[in-house]
Image: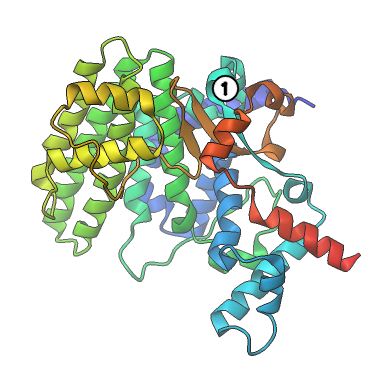
C-alpha cells in the first residue's frame, strides 16, 4: 500500500524545511532540556523518518545487550550470573521487547538496503524529505547540532522521543539519551544530502556547504577561545573529525565527475586550511592521504582508488594501515563503484513498500557490506515462541 503525500503533509514538510535553518541555529537550546528536544524531534521524525528509525532500531539492542543471543540475555536475569548493570539492562531490554511484541513496526520490520540511484525523484522526496530538499543551509543546520551534542561533562542528556508513537520506548528511556543516537542520524543524513546534491548537479550548493561549515568551525574556535571553554579541544576534534569525513566523501564523489582533479584539490584545501587551528598536533597531508587510501581499499571502492593512484603517485598503496576514519558511516550507508549510494532502512517505515523489489540493493552488495538485521527481530521471535 502506498501512503500518498497529501497537500497537508506537503505544506508541513515545506514549512519545516523553510524553518530548519532558524531552528537549528538554536542548536544549544534544542538539546538543553527535554521539552525543547521533544518539539524538535517532531521535525526530525517527519523530515528524516527512515534515517531516524534505522538508527534507533539498529542501536537499541547494541546499547543494552551488545550482540548477545536471546538465551544469554534471558540468563542475565538469573541472580548471580551477571553484574548489577548487566542485570538491569537485560531486564529493561526484555521489557522493551515484551511491550512491543504485538507491534508490527517491530515484529514485521526487516532491515533492508535501498539504492537511492534507482528511485525516481518523487520517491526520494516522499521517503527522504530532508535529503531531497538538501541545501547548504539545511545541511549546515545538521552540522551545527553536532556542537550541541558534545556537551560539557555532567550536563544532562534529553532522551530520544518517538513523536509518531509507533514505538514504546518507556522501558528503556533512561538508556536512550540523544547523544547515543543523534550523531549517527546527522552523519548519515548529511552524507546522503551531499550525495543528492552531487547526483542532481547542484554543485554550487555542494561547495557552499563546505565553505559555510569551515567558516562555522573557525567561528566556534573563536567563540570558545574567548569564553575559555575548557572542553573545546574535545569538541574541536569531534567537529573536525566529522568535517573531514564529509570532505573525503566529497572527494570520492568527485571521481565520478567530469573534472575530478580540480574539485578534489578544492575540497582537500579545506582540510589544509583547518590544520593550523587544531588544538592537537596534525598528522600531515601525506598521512591523511595514506589513511584515506586505506579506507577506500577496505570499502572496495576500486574505481575511485584507481583514480587517486594517478594523482597521488607518492602514496605507498601496499602499506598496511589502520583506518581510523571512513568517508561514510558504514553501519548505514554504502557507496558502490558506479557512484550509487545504498541506504539501510527499516522496511516497515517505507511509505511505499512496493519500491523494494526494484530499488533494493543487490544481494552481492548486501553480502559484501555485511548489512545486519535488527537484533530484536530474532529476540522477539524467540520470546514469542517461548511464550506460546
**Residue that sits furthest to the bottom in the current view:** 80
**Residue that sits furthest to the front in the current view:** 318
Could you say which quadrant of the image residue 190 lies in? Answer: top left
Counting from the top left corner in percent of width and height, residue 204 is at 30, 16
Counting from the top left corner in percent of width and height, residue 354 is at 74, 24
Query: Which quadrant does the C terminus fall into?
Result: bottom right
Counting from the top left corner in percent of width and height, residue 199 is at 43, 17
Residue drawn at (51%, 41%) of the image? 332
Left or right: residue 191 compared with residue 351: left
Height in image: 203 above or below 289? Answer: above
Height in image: 312 above or below 320? Answer: above
Left or right: residue 104 compared with residue 67: right
Counting from the top left corner in percent of width and height, residue 260 is at 26, 16
**Residue that sits furthest to the top in the current view:** 258
Q: How is the image coloured?
A: rainbow
Determine which residue is flagged by label 1: 125
Q: Nearer the viewer, residue 273 or 371?
A: 371
Query: Which quadrant does the N terminus fall into?
Result: top right
Is residue 100 visible in this depiction of the protein? Answer: no
* Mark 1 burial class by Cα count in 10 Å: few <14, some 14-19, many 20+: some
Q: Nearer the viewer, residue 329 or 300?
A: 300
**Residue that sits furthest to the left in the current view:** 276
Could you say which quadrant of the image residue 358 lies in? Answer: top right
Height in image: 62 above or below 194? Answer: below
Q: Helix or strand or loop: what does disc 1 sit on?
A: helix
Residue drawn at (41%, 37%) of the image? 299
Residue drawn at (34%, 35%) of the image? 296
Q: Nearer the viewer, residue 349 or 340?
A: 340
Total labels: the figure holds 1
Is residue 329 visible in this depiction of the protein? Answer: yes
Amino acid at each position: 500500500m502506498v501512503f500518498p503525500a497529501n497537500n497537508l503533509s506537503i505544506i508541513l514538510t515545506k514549512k519545516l524545511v523553510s524553518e530548519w535553518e532558524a531552528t537549528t541555529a538554536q542548536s544549544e537550546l534544542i538539546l538543553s532540556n527535554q521539552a525543547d528536544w521533544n518539539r524538535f524531534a517532531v521535525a526530525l521524525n517527519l523530515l528524516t523518518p527512515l534515517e531516524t528509525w534505522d538508527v534507533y532500531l539498529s542501536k537499541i539492542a547494541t546499547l543494552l545487550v551488545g550482540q548477545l543471543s536471546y538465551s544469554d540475555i534471558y540468563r542475565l536475569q538469573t541472580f548471580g550470573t551477571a553484574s548489577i548493570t548487566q542485570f538491569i539492562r537485560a531486564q529493561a531490554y526484555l521489557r522493551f521487547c515484551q511491550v512491543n511484541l504485538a507491534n508490527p513496526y517491530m515484529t514485521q520490520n526487516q532491515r533492508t538496503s535501498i539504492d537511492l540511484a534507482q528511485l525516481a525523484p518523487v520517491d526520494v522526496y516522499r521517503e527522504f524529505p530532508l535529503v531531497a530538499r538538501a541545501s547548504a543551509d539545511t545541511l549546515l543546520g545538521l552540522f551545527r547540532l553536532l556542537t550541541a551534542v558534545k556537551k560539557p561533562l555532567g550536563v544532562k542528556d534529553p532522551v530520544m522521543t518517538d513523536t509518531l508513537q509507533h514505538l514504546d520506548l518507556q522501558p528503556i528511556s533512561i538508556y536512550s539519551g540523544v547523544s547515543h543516537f543523534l550523531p549517527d542520524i546527522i552523519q548519515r543524513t548529511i552524507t546522503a544530502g551531499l550525495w543528492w546534491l552531487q547526483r542532481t548537479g547542484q554543485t554550487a550548493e555542494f561547495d557552499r556547504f563546505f565553505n559555510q561549515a569551515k567558516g562555522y568551525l573557525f567561528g566556534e574556535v573563536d567563540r570558545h577561545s574567548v569564553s575559555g571553554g575548557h572542553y573545546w579541544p574535545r569538541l574541536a576534534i569531534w567537529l573536525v573529525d566529522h568535517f573531514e569525513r564529509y570532505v573525503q566523501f566529497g572527494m570520492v564523489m568527485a571521481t565520478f565527475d567530469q573534472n575530478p582533479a580540480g574539485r578534489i584539490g578544492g575540497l582537500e584545501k579545506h582540510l589544509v586550511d583547518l590544520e593550523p587551528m587544531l588544538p592537537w598536533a596534525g598528522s600531515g597531508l601525506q598521512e591523511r592521504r595514506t589513511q584515506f587510501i586505506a579506507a577506500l581499499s577496505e570499502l572496495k571502492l576500486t574505481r575511485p582508488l584507481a583514480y587517486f593512484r594517478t594523482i597521488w603517485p607518492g602514496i605507498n598503496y601496499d602499506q598496511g594501515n589502520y583506518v581510523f576514519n571512513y568517508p561514510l558511516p558504514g553501519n548505514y550507508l554504502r557507496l558502490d563503484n558506479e557512484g550509487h549510494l545504498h541506504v539501510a532502512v527499516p522496511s516497515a517505515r517505507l511509505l511505499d513498500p512496493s519500491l523494494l523489489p526494484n530499488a533494493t540493493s543487490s544481494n552481492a552488495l548486501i553480502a559484501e557490506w555485511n548489512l545486519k538485521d535488527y537484533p530484536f527481530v530474532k529476540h522477539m521471535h524467540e520470546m514469542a515462541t517461548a511464550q506460546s
